[in-house]
Amino acid sequence: MDEFSLIQQYFQRPSSDAVKANHQLVMGIGDDCAILDVPRGQQLVFSIDTMVEGVHFTQDTAPADIAWRLLGAAVSDLAAMGATPNNFTLALTIPELSEPWLQSFSDNLSAAAQAYQITLAGGDTSRGPLTLSVQVQGFVDSGQALLRSGANTGDVICVTGTLGDSRAGLSLLDHLTPDADQQYLLDRFYRPVPRVASGLLIKKYATACIDISDGLLADLGHVLSRSKKGGKIDSAAIPLSPQLKHIAGDKALHWALSGGEDFELCFTLSAENWRLLQRELQQAEPGIALCEIGVVTEESGLQIFQDNKWQAVTAQGFQHFSNE
Ligand code: ADP
Ligand code: MG
């Protein structure tokens, strides 16, 4: 099979004209470039993510899981900006032409694309060590993108969903017969769901936002340093799933604070807007929970209240205050 028929068979799926119209795509797969109409009054928001076998996933990872994780992680960056996903391109480097692998990968990529309302608009295919890059594109109303840099002193710090599940899933990869709780955590690792709807909802209220890919402490640290602020968080307020508590025991909090790849959102907003957002949430369909975990401070540095005392968070982890 040559590259042309491979693309036709696996990636050039019939997408209805309605979807194309919705997605502003004038030209998708098949020409030298794709063409996109950027709606008037909107800005194009884009980002690229790469996954390499042996670095981001092991050799025995199912192509279905690779597809969901690849697109979920990439779309999460759009969610963090409060953007609406529109289309993506795929650079696929494969060591050999395995039709079962391509079938499962492309079927699941297509299902994930459907789930996240994003259209495959083009890509590139070559031979080499298994490497997958996805560039995602979305739109925001001009000037409305959620940045990392807008947190104000006194803002409430919040997160979506629960934290630590993906790290717990990672610890379970060699479990051959997972029970229901273990399977839940494995799914959280393999199939992170980008918080697109949450991003769109909080955009109206938030001052800053990031998706949690490196762990809460690290990613909240990015928001605070980009905003030139500090923060205080309460370890007792960190949302943990029952499955995590069951499986991780006394590691649960550590994984929630430092484990990466939950792809939940961490955002800041004024106390008044937090009240308004909670009111809007009560009226909306029940979806992903939002949870207050701390406050933005004028003084730089991140502190966490744990074991009945405030502890400073450093790159190495927590450090007890020497003068306390
Ligand atoms: P060129 O050589 O001009 O770069 P290609 O033969 O690589 O063109 O690609 C032909 C068409 O197929 C282009 O529209 C490209 O975007 C698309 N394409 C190539 N590989 C992929 C892929 N893995 N997934 C989706 N579209 C692809
Ligand atoms: Mg090419």
Image (cartoon, rainbow, N blue to C red):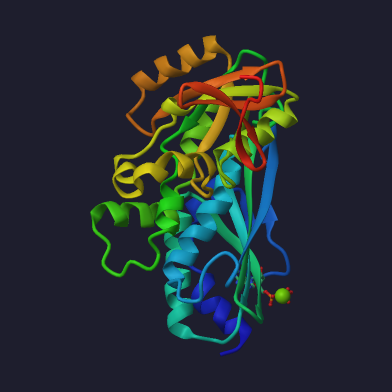
Q: Quadrant location of ligand 1?
A: bottom right
Q: Nearer the viewer, residue 85 or 176?
A: 176
Closer to us: 259 or 288:
259
Q: Position of residue 146 (x, y in %)?
A: 64, 31
Q: Nearer the viewer, residue 275 or 141?
A: 275
Is 53 left, or right, of 42 in this rendering? Answer: left
Q: Residue at x 60, y 84 (%)?
A: 95
Q: What residue sits 51% from the left and 47% below the top? A: 259
The structure residue drawn at horizontal position 62% and vertical position 23%, both measured from the top left corner, is: 231
Residue found at the far left of this picture? 179
Q: Furthest residue to the bottom?
A: 1
Picture layout, residue 230 above or below residue 82: above
The answer to whether any part of residue 37 appears in the image is no
Q: Quadrant of the C terminus?
A: top right
Q: Position of residue 267 (x, y in %)?
A: 57, 28
Task: Work out whether 220 lies above or below 324.
Answer: below
Name the quadrant of the N terminus: bottom right
Most foreground residue, 245 or 277: 245
Picture coordinates of residue 142, whole percent (x, y): 70, 30
Residue 124 is left or right of residue 177, and the answer is: right
Count up the numbered dots.
0
- Residue 48 falls in which quadrant of the image? bottom right
The answer to whether residue 119 shows anywhere in this view is yes
Q: Residue 319 placed where, x, y %?
A: 62, 33
Residue that sits furthest to the top in the current view: 272
Q: Residue at x 66, y 34 (%)?
A: 221
